[in-house]
Amino acid sequence: MNIVLVVYDSLRKDCIGCYNDGPPGTPPWPWRVRTPHLDALAGESLVMDRAYPESLPTLPTRRALYTGRRVFPFDKGDFHLKGDFLGAPGWGPIPEDQDTLAEMLRQAGYRTGLIADVYHMFKPSKNYWRGFEQWTFLRGQETDPSRSGPEPADEVIRRYLPQELENPRRRKFVATALKNMYDRLREEDYFNARVLIESANWLQQNRDAERFFLVVESFDPHEPWFVPAHYRRMYDDADGPEQVISGYAENEMPPHLLRRTQANYSGLVTMCDRWFGHLYETMRVLGMLEDTVLIVTTDHGHSIGDAGYVGKRGYPSVPGVYDVPVFIRHPEGVGAGRRSDLFVQHTDLTAQILQFAGLPVPEDLDGKAFFEAAVAGGPAIRDHVTVGWGTNVTAIDDRWWLNCKVDGTGVLLRDLTAAEPFAANVADKNRQEVRRLFEAALADASRPIPEYLLEMARKQEDAPGCSALAARE
Protein backbone atom coordinates (compact mmCIF):
# COMPACT_ATOMS: atom_id res chain seq x y z
CA MET A 1 0.00 0.00 0.00
CA ASN A 2 1.33 3.46 -0.92
CA ILE A 3 1.21 6.28 1.62
CA VAL A 4 1.02 10.06 1.12
CA LEU A 5 1.30 12.27 4.21
CA VAL A 6 0.44 15.97 3.80
CA VAL A 7 1.45 18.29 6.66
CA TYR A 8 0.48 21.95 6.71
CA ASP A 9 1.91 24.53 9.12
CA SER A 10 -0.37 26.74 11.23
CA LEU A 11 -3.61 25.50 9.66
CA ARG A 12 -6.43 26.20 12.09
CA LYS A 13 -8.76 23.26 12.45
CA ASP A 14 -11.78 25.55 12.87
CA CYS A 15 -11.00 27.22 9.52
CA ILE A 16 -11.73 23.95 7.69
CA GLY A 17 -15.39 23.76 6.77
CA CYS A 18 -16.03 20.20 7.93
CA TYR A 19 -14.72 21.10 11.39
CA ASN A 20 -16.77 24.30 11.74
CA ASP A 21 -20.48 23.62 11.38
CA GLY A 22 -21.55 26.84 13.07
CA PRO A 23 -23.26 29.68 11.19
CA PRO A 24 -21.25 32.42 9.48
CA GLY A 25 -19.79 34.63 12.17
CA THR A 26 -18.84 31.70 14.37
CA PRO A 27 -15.40 32.31 15.90
CA PRO A 28 -12.63 32.80 15.05
CA TRP A 29 -13.91 35.59 12.76
CA PRO A 30 -16.90 36.93 10.84
CA TRP A 31 -17.02 34.47 7.92
CA ARG A 32 -16.82 30.84 6.96
CA VAL A 33 -13.44 30.01 5.38
CA ARG A 34 -13.87 28.19 2.08
CA THR A 35 -12.16 24.78 1.92
CA PRO A 36 -14.17 22.75 -0.63
CA HIS A 37 -11.44 20.22 -1.42
CA LEU A 38 -10.68 19.35 2.20
CA ASP A 39 -14.41 19.21 2.91
CA ALA A 40 -14.80 16.74 0.04
CA LEU A 41 -11.87 14.74 1.40
CA ALA A 42 -13.65 14.54 4.76
CA GLY A 43 -16.54 12.75 3.09
CA GLU A 44 -14.14 10.06 1.88
CA SER A 45 -12.07 9.85 5.06
CA LEU A 46 -11.99 8.93 8.69
CA VAL A 47 -11.96 12.33 10.42
CA MET A 48 -10.43 12.58 13.89
CA ASP A 49 -12.12 15.14 16.13
CA ARG A 50 -9.69 15.07 19.08
CA ALA A 51 -6.19 15.10 17.63
CA TYR A 52 -3.27 16.97 19.21
CA PRO A 53 0.47 17.46 18.75
CA GLU A 54 2.85 15.76 21.17
CA SER A 55 5.26 18.69 21.38
CA LEU A 56 5.34 22.19 19.97
CA PRO A 57 6.19 24.26 18.01
CA THR A 58 7.41 23.52 14.44
CA LEU A 59 10.48 21.30 14.82
CA PRO A 60 9.54 19.40 18.00
CA THR A 61 6.20 18.60 16.36
CA ARG A 62 7.87 17.14 13.30
CA ARG A 63 10.42 15.22 15.33
CA ALA A 64 7.56 13.47 17.16
CA LEU A 65 5.72 12.82 13.90
CA TYR A 66 8.80 11.57 12.06
CA THR A 67 9.91 9.22 14.85
CA GLY A 68 6.79 8.25 16.80
CA ARG A 69 8.65 9.06 20.01
CA ARG A 70 7.95 11.67 22.64
CA VAL A 71 10.02 14.84 22.59
CA PHE A 72 8.65 16.30 25.83
CA PRO A 73 10.23 16.96 28.37
CA PHE A 74 13.00 18.17 26.02
CA ASP A 75 15.87 16.54 27.88
CA LYS A 76 19.06 17.12 25.90
CA GLY A 77 16.99 19.77 24.14
CA ASP A 78 18.76 22.97 25.20
CA PHE A 79 20.04 23.66 21.69
CA HIS A 80 22.32 26.56 20.75
CA LEU A 81 23.23 25.63 17.18
CA LYS A 82 25.24 27.73 14.78
CA GLY A 83 23.25 28.90 11.81
CA ASP A 84 19.93 28.97 13.64
CA PHE A 85 18.12 31.28 16.03
CA LEU A 86 17.47 30.18 19.59
CA GLY A 87 14.16 28.43 19.18
CA ALA A 88 12.03 26.70 21.79
CA PRO A 89 13.41 23.84 23.90
CA GLY A 90 13.69 20.78 21.69
CA TRP A 91 14.29 22.93 18.59
CA GLY A 92 17.00 20.74 17.14
CA PRO A 93 17.79 17.74 14.97
CA ILE A 94 16.37 14.24 15.23
CA PRO A 95 18.65 12.20 17.54
CA GLU A 96 20.96 9.84 15.70
CA ASP A 97 19.83 6.90 17.83
CA GLN A 98 16.17 7.31 16.78
CA ASP A 99 15.04 5.74 13.53
CA THR A 100 12.82 7.90 11.36
CA LEU A 101 9.62 6.73 9.73
CA ALA A 102 11.20 7.27 6.31
CA GLU A 103 14.18 5.12 7.27
CA MET A 104 11.96 2.29 8.49
CA LEU A 105 9.79 2.36 5.37
CA ARG A 106 12.77 2.62 3.03
CA GLN A 107 14.35 -0.41 4.67
CA ALA A 108 11.08 -2.26 4.06
CA GLY A 109 11.24 -1.54 0.33
CA TYR A 110 9.36 1.72 0.03
CA ARG A 111 10.55 4.47 -2.28
CA THR A 112 10.58 7.59 -0.11
CA GLY A 113 10.23 11.24 -1.04
CA LEU A 114 10.00 14.58 0.78
CA ILE A 115 8.80 17.81 -0.84
CA ALA A 116 8.99 20.76 1.57
CA ASP A 117 9.37 24.50 1.99
CA VAL A 118 9.57 24.36 5.80
CA TYR A 119 13.01 25.95 5.89
CA HIS A 120 13.61 25.22 9.60
CA MET A 121 13.96 21.53 8.67
CA PHE A 122 16.91 22.29 6.38
CA LYS A 123 18.96 24.72 8.44
CA PRO A 124 22.55 23.88 9.46
CA SER A 125 22.67 21.00 11.96
CA LYS A 126 19.17 19.77 11.03
CA ASN A 127 18.53 16.32 9.56
CA TYR A 128 14.81 15.99 8.92
CA TRP A 129 15.43 14.57 5.43
CA ARG A 130 16.97 11.39 6.86
CA GLY A 131 15.62 8.30 5.12
CA PHE A 132 14.26 10.04 2.05
CA GLU A 133 15.66 8.88 -1.28
CA GLN A 134 14.68 12.21 -2.74
CA TRP A 135 14.23 15.37 -0.73
CA THR A 136 13.36 18.61 -2.44
CA PHE A 137 13.70 21.87 -0.51
CA LEU A 138 11.81 24.78 -2.06
CA ARG A 139 13.54 27.87 -0.71
CA GLY A 140 12.44 31.34 0.28
CA GLN A 141 9.81 31.07 3.00
CA GLU A 142 9.77 33.73 5.71
CA THR A 143 13.40 34.75 6.49
CA ASP A 144 15.15 31.91 4.69
CA PRO A 145 18.22 33.77 3.27
CA SER A 146 17.57 32.69 -0.30
CA ARG A 147 18.19 36.17 -1.75
CA SER A 148 20.55 38.95 -0.72
CA GLY A 149 19.00 41.70 -2.82
CA PRO A 150 17.84 44.01 -4.10
CA GLU A 151 16.31 45.63 -1.03
CA PRO A 152 12.59 46.37 -1.47
CA ALA A 153 11.56 50.00 -1.72
CA ASP A 154 10.01 51.71 1.27
CA GLU A 155 6.62 52.00 -0.40
CA VAL A 156 6.58 48.25 -1.04
CA ILE A 157 7.36 47.49 2.59
CA ARG A 158 4.73 49.97 3.73
CA ARG A 159 2.12 48.21 1.61
CA TYR A 160 2.43 45.12 3.78
CA LEU A 161 3.55 46.66 7.10
CA PRO A 162 1.27 49.50 8.23
CA GLN A 163 3.12 52.41 9.78
CA GLU A 164 1.37 52.09 13.14
CA LEU A 165 2.73 48.54 13.53
CA GLU A 166 6.26 49.17 12.31
CA ASN A 167 9.39 48.62 14.37
CA PRO A 168 12.92 47.66 13.26
CA ARG A 169 12.46 43.94 13.84
CA ARG A 170 9.19 43.76 11.91
CA ARG A 171 10.54 45.91 9.10
CA LYS A 172 13.55 43.63 8.68
CA PHE A 173 11.32 40.56 8.68
CA VAL A 174 8.96 41.91 6.02
CA ALA A 175 11.84 43.25 3.89
CA THR A 176 13.55 39.83 3.88
CA ALA A 177 10.31 38.05 3.01
CA LEU A 178 9.67 40.49 0.16
CA LYS A 179 13.15 39.94 -1.26
CA ASN A 180 12.35 36.25 -1.43
CA MET A 181 9.20 36.79 -3.52
CA TYR A 182 10.29 39.18 -6.26
CA ASP A 183 9.52 36.71 -9.05
CA ARG A 184 5.98 35.88 -7.98
CA LEU A 185 4.13 36.80 -11.15
CA ARG A 186 1.48 34.07 -11.16
CA GLU A 187 -0.45 32.13 -8.56
CA GLU A 188 1.67 29.07 -9.40
CA ASP A 189 4.75 30.96 -8.14
CA TYR A 190 3.47 31.11 -4.54
CA PHE A 191 4.90 28.64 -2.09
CA ASN A 192 1.96 26.38 -1.34
CA ALA A 193 1.23 26.06 -5.04
CA ARG A 194 4.88 25.21 -5.78
CA VAL A 195 5.00 22.57 -3.02
CA LEU A 196 1.84 20.83 -4.18
CA ILE A 197 2.75 21.07 -7.88
CA GLU A 198 6.19 19.59 -7.19
CA SER A 199 4.57 16.84 -5.10
CA ALA A 200 2.23 16.01 -7.97
CA ASN A 201 5.25 15.90 -10.27
CA TRP A 202 6.99 13.47 -7.89
CA LEU A 203 4.00 11.15 -8.08
CA GLN A 204 4.15 11.19 -11.88
CA GLN A 205 7.91 10.60 -11.91
CA ASN A 206 7.69 7.66 -9.50
CA ARG A 207 4.82 5.67 -10.96
CA ASP A 208 7.22 2.76 -11.46
CA ALA A 209 7.75 2.35 -7.69
CA GLU A 210 6.38 -0.88 -6.27
CA ARG A 211 5.48 0.99 -3.09
CA PHE A 212 6.10 4.60 -2.14
CA PHE A 213 5.95 6.95 0.84
CA LEU A 214 5.66 10.66 0.03
CA VAL A 215 5.70 13.42 2.67
CA VAL A 216 4.41 16.82 1.56
CA GLU A 217 5.35 19.68 3.91
CA SER A 218 3.72 23.05 3.22
CA PHE A 219 4.82 25.96 5.43
CA ASP A 220 1.67 27.84 4.37
CA PRO A 221 -0.64 29.00 5.85
CA HIS A 222 2.07 30.08 8.31
CA GLU A 223 2.77 33.80 8.36
CA PRO A 224 3.74 36.03 6.60
CA TRP A 225 0.34 35.84 4.93
CA PHE A 226 1.25 36.94 1.41
CA VAL A 227 -1.54 35.75 -0.85
CA PRO A 228 -2.83 36.74 -4.30
CA ALA A 229 -5.36 39.53 -3.93
CA HIS A 230 -8.23 37.52 -5.39
CA TYR A 231 -8.07 35.12 -2.44
CA ARG A 232 -8.00 37.91 0.14
CA ARG A 233 -10.91 39.66 -1.59
CA MET A 234 -13.07 36.60 -0.94
CA TYR A 235 -13.13 37.80 2.67
CA ASP A 236 -12.32 41.51 2.64
CA ASP A 237 -12.82 43.53 -0.54
CA ALA A 238 -11.93 46.88 1.03
CA ASP A 239 -9.08 49.01 -0.27
CA GLY A 240 -6.18 49.84 2.03
CA PRO A 241 -2.89 48.45 3.32
CA GLU A 242 -2.26 44.76 3.84
CA GLN A 243 -1.16 43.24 7.16
CA VAL A 244 0.69 39.93 6.94
CA ILE A 245 2.64 39.33 10.19
CA SER A 246 2.11 38.31 13.80
CA GLY A 247 3.15 40.47 16.72
CA TYR A 248 3.29 37.47 19.09
CA ALA A 249 1.67 39.71 21.68
CA GLU A 250 -1.71 40.95 22.79
CA ASN A 251 -3.59 42.35 19.82
CA GLU A 252 -2.55 45.95 19.10
CA MET A 253 -4.29 46.35 15.77
CA PRO A 254 -7.31 48.56 15.09
CA PRO A 255 -10.38 46.65 13.84
CA HIS A 256 -9.78 47.28 10.12
CA LEU A 257 -6.23 45.89 10.30
CA LEU A 258 -7.27 42.88 12.34
CA ARG A 259 -9.97 42.15 9.76
CA ARG A 260 -7.42 42.47 6.95
CA THR A 261 -5.05 40.11 8.80
CA GLN A 262 -7.82 37.55 9.23
CA ALA A 263 -8.76 37.95 5.56
CA ASN A 264 -5.20 37.35 4.38
CA TYR A 265 -4.93 34.24 6.57
CA SER A 266 -8.33 32.99 5.38
CA GLY A 267 -7.35 33.62 1.78
CA LEU A 268 -4.15 31.66 2.24
CA VAL A 269 -6.09 28.76 3.79
CA THR A 270 -8.40 28.75 0.77
CA MET A 271 -5.39 28.85 -1.55
CA CYS A 272 -3.81 25.89 0.29
CA ASP A 273 -7.10 24.03 -0.17
CA ARG A 274 -7.18 24.86 -3.89
CA TRP A 275 -3.68 23.45 -4.49
CA PHE A 276 -4.34 20.43 -2.31
CA GLY A 277 -7.09 19.81 -4.84
CA HIS A 278 -4.41 19.74 -7.55
CA LEU A 279 -2.50 17.01 -5.71
CA TYR A 280 -5.68 15.04 -5.10
CA GLU A 281 -6.76 15.31 -8.74
CA THR A 282 -3.31 14.15 -9.86
CA MET A 283 -3.65 11.10 -7.63
CA ARG A 284 -7.06 10.40 -9.12
CA VAL A 285 -5.88 10.70 -12.73
CA LEU A 286 -2.88 8.45 -12.04
CA GLY A 287 -5.12 5.84 -10.41
CA MET A 288 -3.30 6.23 -7.11
CA LEU A 289 -6.41 6.79 -5.01
CA GLU A 290 -7.11 3.08 -5.49
CA ASP A 291 -3.93 1.87 -3.75
CA THR A 292 -2.75 4.80 -1.60
CA VAL A 293 -3.56 5.89 1.93
CA LEU A 294 -3.81 9.70 2.02
CA ILE A 295 -3.32 11.44 5.38
CA VAL A 296 -3.67 15.19 5.97
CA THR A 297 -2.81 17.02 9.18
CA THR A 298 -1.01 20.11 10.53
CA ASP A 299 1.44 20.88 13.29
CA HIS A 300 -0.69 23.47 15.12
CA GLY A 301 -3.00 26.42 14.59
CA HIS A 302 -2.55 30.16 15.12
CA SER A 303 -4.36 32.83 17.14
CA ILE A 304 -5.37 35.84 15.06
CA GLY A 305 -7.22 38.06 17.46
CA ASP A 306 -9.16 35.37 19.30
CA ALA A 307 -8.52 35.52 23.03
CA GLY A 308 -7.06 38.97 22.31
CA TYR A 309 -3.79 37.53 21.00
CA VAL A 310 -1.99 37.40 17.66
CA GLY A 311 0.53 34.56 17.36
CA LYS A 312 0.90 31.15 18.95
CA ARG A 313 2.04 30.23 22.42
CA GLY A 314 2.09 27.39 24.88
CA TYR A 315 0.82 29.37 27.86
CA PRO A 316 -2.05 30.01 28.07
CA SER A 317 -2.81 27.20 25.64
CA VAL A 318 -6.01 27.37 23.58
CA PRO A 319 -7.82 25.07 21.11
CA GLY A 320 -7.21 27.45 18.20
CA VAL A 321 -3.53 26.53 18.44
CA TYR A 322 -3.59 23.03 19.96
CA ASP A 323 -6.47 21.30 18.15
CA VAL A 324 -5.28 19.82 14.85
CA PRO A 325 -7.17 18.23 11.96
CA VAL A 326 -6.52 14.65 10.87
CA PHE A 327 -8.02 13.10 7.73
CA ILE A 328 -7.27 9.48 6.76
CA ARG A 329 -8.53 8.37 3.36
CA HIS A 330 -8.26 4.60 2.92
CA PRO A 331 -8.13 3.36 -0.69
CA GLU A 332 -10.75 0.70 0.03
CA GLY A 333 -13.16 3.21 1.54
CA VAL A 334 -12.71 1.92 5.10
CA GLY A 335 -13.92 4.59 7.52
CA ALA A 336 -15.17 6.89 4.77
CA GLY A 337 -17.47 9.58 6.14
CA ARG A 338 -16.94 8.49 9.75
CA ARG A 339 -15.78 10.69 12.61
CA SER A 340 -14.00 9.56 15.75
CA ASP A 341 -13.55 11.24 19.12
CA LEU A 342 -10.66 9.01 20.21
CA PHE A 343 -7.74 10.97 21.63
CA VAL A 344 -4.80 10.72 19.21
CA GLN A 345 -1.47 12.52 18.82
CA HIS A 346 1.09 12.90 16.07
CA THR A 347 3.11 9.98 17.45
CA ASP A 348 0.06 7.78 16.84
CA LEU A 349 0.08 8.74 13.15
CA THR A 350 3.61 7.32 12.97
CA ALA A 351 2.48 4.01 14.42
CA GLN A 352 -0.57 3.94 12.18
CA ILE A 353 1.50 4.53 9.04
CA LEU A 354 3.72 1.59 9.98
CA GLN A 355 0.63 -0.56 10.42
CA PHE A 356 -0.73 0.54 7.03
CA ALA A 357 2.62 -0.52 5.55
CA GLY A 358 2.26 -3.97 7.12
CA LEU A 359 5.21 -3.41 9.42
CA PRO A 360 5.40 -4.17 13.16
CA VAL A 361 5.18 -1.16 15.44
CA PRO A 362 8.38 -1.13 17.56
CA GLU A 363 7.73 -1.64 21.25
CA ASP A 364 9.67 1.49 22.17
CA LEU A 365 7.47 3.71 20.01
CA ASP A 366 5.27 6.03 22.09
CA GLY A 367 2.61 6.14 19.38
CA LYS A 368 -0.18 3.59 19.03
CA ALA A 369 -2.08 2.48 15.93
CA PHE A 370 -5.70 3.60 16.21
CA PHE A 371 -7.41 3.32 12.81
CA GLU A 372 -9.25 0.06 13.42
CA ALA A 373 -10.54 1.17 16.82
CA ALA A 374 -11.62 4.54 15.44
CA VAL A 375 -13.52 3.00 12.53
CA ALA A 376 -15.20 0.35 14.65
CA GLY A 377 -15.94 2.62 17.59
CA GLY A 378 -13.62 0.51 19.68
CA PRO A 379 -11.98 1.29 23.02
CA ALA A 380 -9.83 4.40 23.41
CA ILE A 381 -6.09 4.02 23.01
CA ARG A 382 -5.60 6.64 25.77
CA ASP A 383 -7.80 8.57 28.19
CA HIS A 384 -5.90 11.87 27.89
CA VAL A 385 -3.19 13.64 25.93
CA THR A 386 -0.12 15.54 27.08
CA VAL A 387 1.39 18.31 24.95
CA GLY A 388 4.72 19.96 25.84
CA TRP A 389 5.75 23.41 24.69
CA GLY A 390 8.97 24.74 26.17
CA THR A 391 8.51 25.51 29.85
CA ASN A 392 4.80 24.69 29.72
CA VAL A 393 2.69 21.57 29.59
CA THR A 394 -0.95 20.96 28.67
CA ALA A 395 -2.94 17.88 29.69
CA ILE A 396 -6.43 17.26 28.28
CA ASP A 397 -9.01 14.61 29.09
CA ASP A 398 -12.74 14.22 28.51
CA ARG A 399 -13.63 17.06 30.86
CA TRP A 400 -10.56 19.08 31.78
CA TRP A 401 -7.88 21.18 30.07
CA LEU A 402 -4.89 21.79 32.36
CA ASN A 403 -2.13 24.23 31.41
CA CYS A 404 0.74 25.18 33.70
CA LYS A 405 4.50 25.55 33.88
CA VAL A 406 6.60 22.40 34.10
CA ASP A 407 7.40 23.11 37.76
CA GLY A 408 3.68 22.93 38.55
CA THR A 409 3.13 26.65 39.08
CA GLY A 410 0.99 29.15 37.21
CA VAL A 411 -1.98 26.79 36.98
CA LEU A 412 -4.89 27.22 34.59
CA LEU A 413 -7.70 24.63 34.60
CA ARG A 414 -10.60 24.79 32.16
CA ASP A 415 -13.87 22.87 32.46
CA LEU A 416 -14.64 21.64 28.95
CA THR A 417 -18.28 20.97 29.89
CA ALA A 418 -18.90 24.65 30.61
CA ALA A 419 -20.71 26.85 28.08
CA GLU A 420 -17.52 28.91 27.64
CA PRO A 421 -14.72 26.68 28.91
CA PHE A 422 -11.91 29.20 28.52
CA ALA A 423 -13.74 32.09 30.14
CA ALA A 424 -12.81 31.02 33.68
CA ASN A 425 -9.97 29.33 35.54
CA VAL A 426 -11.50 26.73 37.88
CA ALA A 427 -8.26 25.39 39.36
CA ASP A 428 -8.86 26.51 42.94
CA LYS A 429 -12.17 24.66 43.08
CA ASN A 430 -10.73 21.48 41.57
CA ARG A 431 -7.34 20.97 43.18
CA GLN A 432 -7.53 17.19 43.04
CA GLU A 433 -8.09 17.26 39.27
CA VAL A 434 -5.15 19.65 38.85
CA ARG A 435 -2.82 17.30 40.71
CA ARG A 436 -4.15 14.24 38.87
CA LEU A 437 -3.64 15.71 35.42
CA PHE A 438 -0.23 17.15 36.25
CA GLU A 439 0.97 13.80 37.56
CA ALA A 440 -0.37 12.16 34.39
CA ALA A 441 1.62 14.62 32.30
CA LEU A 442 4.80 13.88 34.24
CA ALA A 443 4.18 10.15 33.82
CA ASP A 444 3.81 10.64 30.07
CA ALA A 445 7.17 12.43 30.00
CA SER A 446 8.65 9.13 31.28
CA ARG A 447 11.80 10.92 32.43
CA PRO A 448 12.55 13.79 34.81
CA ILE A 449 12.02 17.39 33.77
CA PRO A 450 15.57 18.66 33.02
CA GLU A 451 17.01 21.27 35.34
CA TYR A 452 17.55 23.85 32.59
CA LEU A 453 13.83 23.73 31.82
CA LEU A 454 12.84 24.03 35.50
CA GLU A 455 15.14 27.05 35.82
CA MET A 456 13.51 28.66 32.78
CA ALA A 457 10.07 27.99 34.28
CA ARG A 458 11.05 29.64 37.56
CA LYS A 459 11.99 32.80 35.65
CA GLN A 460 8.85 32.80 33.50
CA GLU A 461 6.00 35.11 34.48
CA ASP A 462 2.71 33.52 35.45
CA ALA A 463 -0.16 33.98 33.02
CA PRO A 464 -2.81 36.53 34.04
CA GLY A 465 -5.60 34.88 35.96
CA CYS A 466 -3.66 31.74 36.89
CA SER A 467 -4.04 30.05 40.25
CA ALA A 468 -1.50 30.45 43.02
CA LEU A 469 -1.69 26.77 43.92
CA ALA A 470 1.04 24.38 42.82
CA ALA A 471 0.00 21.40 40.74
CA ARG A 472 2.45 19.25 42.66
CA GLU A 473 2.28 19.73 46.41
Image (cartoon, rainbow, N blue to C red):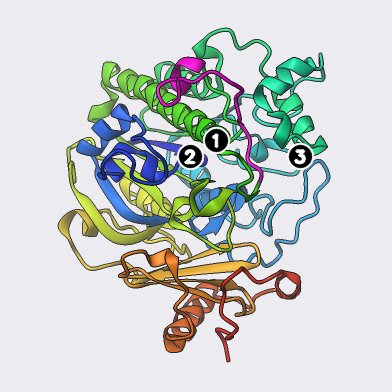
Magenta stretch: residue 365 in it?
Answer: no
Which label's residue is closer to the chain start, 1 or 3? 3
Task: Determine contact: label 1, label 2, CB under 8 Å.
Answer: yes
Q: Could you say where residue 144 lies in the image, as x and y percent from the top left?
A: 72, 30
Q: Does residue 242 belong to the magenta stretch?
A: yes
Q: Is residue 311 visible in the rendered structure shown here?
A: no
Residue type marked 1: Phe
Quarter of the image containing the C terminus?
Answer: bottom right
The residue carrying mark 2 is 106
Q: Give the answer, above or below, for where 338 lies relative to 434.
A: above
> Which disc is residue 32 wearing?
none
Identity of the residue furthest to the bottom in this view: 473
Asked if one can make out residue 448 in the rendered structure from this viewpoint, the answer is yes
Left or right of 176: which side holds 212?
A: left
Asked if disc 1 and disc 3 are in contact, CB closer than 8 Å, the reply is no
Residue at the (42%, 83%) spot, across then down: 433
Q: Secondary structure at mark 3?
A: loop
- Give residue 389's quadrant in the image: bottom right
Q: Which mark is residue 132?
A: 1
Magenta stretch, residue numbers: 229-247
Q: Earlier in the sequence, mark 3 or mark 2?
A: 2
Q: Characterize the magenta stretch by its predominant secondary structure.
A: loop
The mark nearer the N terminus, 1 or 2, is 2
- Kind of residue indicated by mark 2: Arg
Q: Nearer the viewer, mark 1 or mark 2?
A: 1
- Report the disc number at residue 124: 3
Pointers 3 and 2 in contact (CB under 8 A)? no
